[in-house]
Image (cartoon, rainbow, N blue to C red):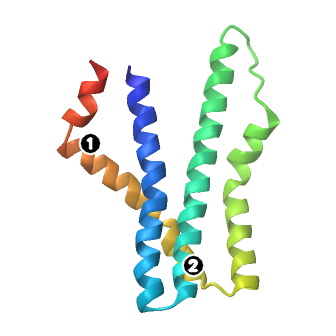
Amino acid sequence: MGDYLYRETESRISHLTLVFGALAAIPVAYLHNWRWAAGLFIGAFLAWCNFRWLKQGANALTSAATAQAQRKKVRVPLATYFTALFRYGLIALAVYVIFKYLNVPVLSMVVGLCALGAATIAVSVHSILRPSDYEWKNR
């Protein structure tokens, strides 16, 4: 049952990352500049991608280690290493290309990347203030 709780928490963080990015981008587009709004949402989307890649990599490593628990040498798929090592590089490359060719401010994308942290904090605070929302599913 505890595994369900972790999956539910990950799902909430994942969804809130995109929601926070959109909620930040809408007023910025209306009040300030559409390029800044695009940068905020692009940053939030890249943070969401990073979170999903991190989760997939951790799940792949865990399942490979569990499946091969009796072996001395565990074999992990090459794609798992690629996403684990190069996800930040891929995000940096995406930010550079978007900045260079779409003229979206880099600072707005960096602020958008913070949506993942904001979502994580929001879910953590919610789980502390309303533990009953999380406990009843474990019974």
Looking at the rendered structure, the secondary structure element under dot 1 is helix
Indicate whether 130 appears above or below 110: above
Q: Residue at (60%, 85%) from the top-left corner?
A: 105
* Amino acid type at image mark 1: Ser
Indicate whether 60 appears above or below 71: below
Q: Nearer the viewer, residue 87 or 126?
A: 126
- On-image quarter of the C terminus: top left
* Amino acid type at image mark 2: Ala
Q: Residue at (42%, 33%) from the top-left corner?
A: 6
Task: Please give the residue where the numbered disc 1 appears in the rendered image.
Answer: 127
Q: Which mark is residue 96?
A: none
Q: Is residue 45 visible?
A: yes
In this rendering, the label closer to the viewer, 1 or 2: 2
Task: Give percent across and percent down for residue 136.
Answer: 24, 26
For this orientation, the residue located farthest to the bottom is 32
Task: Please give the residue where the numbered disc 2 appears in the rendered image.
Answer: 38
For this orientation, the residue located farthest to the right is 78
Q: Nearer the viewer, residue 16 or 64?
A: 16
Indicate whether 33 appears above or below 54: below
Indicate whether 132 appears above or below 92: above
Which numbered disc, 1 or 2, marks the residue that appears first in the sequence? 2
- On-image quarter of the N terminus: top left
Q: Residues within 10 Å of mark 2 (few under 14, many from 20)?
A: many
